[in-house]
Structures are given as C-alpha cells and as structure tokens.
C-alpha cells in the first residue's frame, strides 16, 4: 500500500509541474507568449521523469510492480510530456501555464544559457527552457527589466 502511495505522489507531482486544477494567472498586460517544444518540455520534466523511470526499474526488479503498472506509469509520463507548456511574459512578471507566476522584482539579473535563460534573484533561481526561435525575443524582453550577468560555468541543465 505504501508503494502505491509513493508512486501516486510521484505521478501527481510530475503532473503538477505542467498543470494545476486551480492555478495562478499572470497579472498585467501580456507582452510575449512562448510555447515550448518537445525538447523544452523534456528538459522541464526530466527530473520527475527520471524518478518515475527509477520507480519502474525498482518495481520490476523487486517484483512489487506488475507489468501493467509499469506500462501505466510509462503511459502517464508520456501523456504529461504531451501537455502543452507555455511561458507568459507580462509587464509584471513571468508565468508557466497556470503553475507559477514570478514577479520581475524577485530577480536581480539573468544569465543567457545555450538552452535559454536563468533568472537569478534573492530566492531560488528560475530556469526558462526556450525554443531556439524565441530565445532572442525573450532575452531582449528580460534584458529590458534585468541586468545581464556572464555565464560562470558551462551547464547543461
């Protein structure tokens, strides 16, 4: 029973990173909306998908997760990857779907990365995984609000 709770919680946490039944809306006038492609959605969910894959592997090796359960978890992971994700940039901040909204005041600088932009602030950093065709527009928009910092080390995250 504990295993079912663990697997269910891991699956729900993965879903909640893409969609919430009652979420936040991005206040302010919309400046730019950027839909994420397959690669960017994979990057956004990858840690959760790795965790689900480990659960499938451990469940199959330990014999406590039947083949049907493994298939259901894998199918769920694929469905979550197919959910559309999009960043909404407004005059007041940035949002991902209805999952989060962060105000520009929470950040003091940004770093351009090969995969997008990392917003740095007093709290946790925010990584924005951007499709190549939108990176320049987003960098210009973010650059008008925050100062640019140089990349310290190459990073693949």
Image (spheres, rainbow, N blue to C red):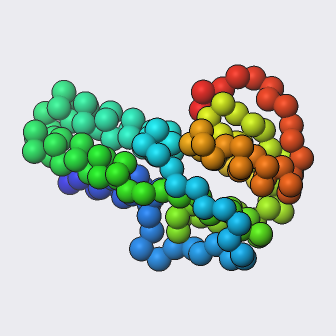
Task: Find residue 35 and report its horizontal and vertical position in percent.
Answer: 52, 55
Q: Quadrant of the C terminus?
A: top right
Question: Can residue 10 be seen?
Answer: no
Q: Quadrant of residue 55?
A: top left
Going 32% across and 33% down the picture, which residue do you hit? 54
Task: Find residue 94 and report its horizontal and vertical position in percent.
Answer: 68, 62
Of 133 and 106, nearer the camera is: 133
Q: How many marks?
A: 0
Going 42% across and 57% down the picture, which residue do you hit? 84
Looking at this view, name the residue that lies furthest to the front: 133
Of 117 and 52, nearer the camera is: 117
Q: Quadrant of residue 49?
A: top left
In this view, 121 is above or below 153: below
Going 89% across and 47% down the picture, which residue do you hit? 147
Looking at this view, name the residue that lies furthest to the right: 147
Question: Can residue 11 be seen?
Answer: yes
Task: Find residue 5 and report its horizontal and vertical position in percent.
Answer: 28, 55
Relative to 84, 157 lies left or right: right
Relative to 14, 77 lies left or right: left
Task: Find residue 82 and report its horizontal and vertical position in percent.
Answer: 34, 51
Q: Quadrant of the N terminus?
A: bottom left
Going 60% across and 42% down the picture, which residue do you hit? 133
In this view, 55 is above or below 100: above
Relative to 152, 12 lies left or right: left
């Amino acid at each position: 029973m504990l295993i079912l709770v663990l697997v269910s919680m891991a699956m729900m946490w993965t879903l909640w990173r893409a969609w919430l039944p009652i979420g936040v809306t991005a206040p302010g006038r919309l400046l730019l909306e950027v839909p994420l492609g397959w690669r960017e959605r994979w990057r956004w969910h990858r840690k959760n998908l790795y965790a689900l894959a480990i659960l499938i592997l451990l469940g199959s090796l330990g014999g406590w997760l039947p083949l049907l359960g493994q298939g259901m978890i894998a199918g769920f992971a694929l469905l979550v990857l197919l959910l559309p994700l999009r960043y909404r940039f407004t005059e007041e901040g940035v949002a991902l779907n209805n999952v989060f909204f962060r105000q520009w005041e929470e950040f003091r600088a940004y770093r351009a990365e090969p995969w997008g932009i990392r917003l740095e602030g007093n709290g946790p950093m925010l990584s924005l995984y951007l499709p190549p065709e939108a990176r320049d527009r987003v960098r210009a928009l973010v650059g008008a609000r925050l100062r640019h910092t140089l990349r310290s080390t190459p990073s693949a995250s």
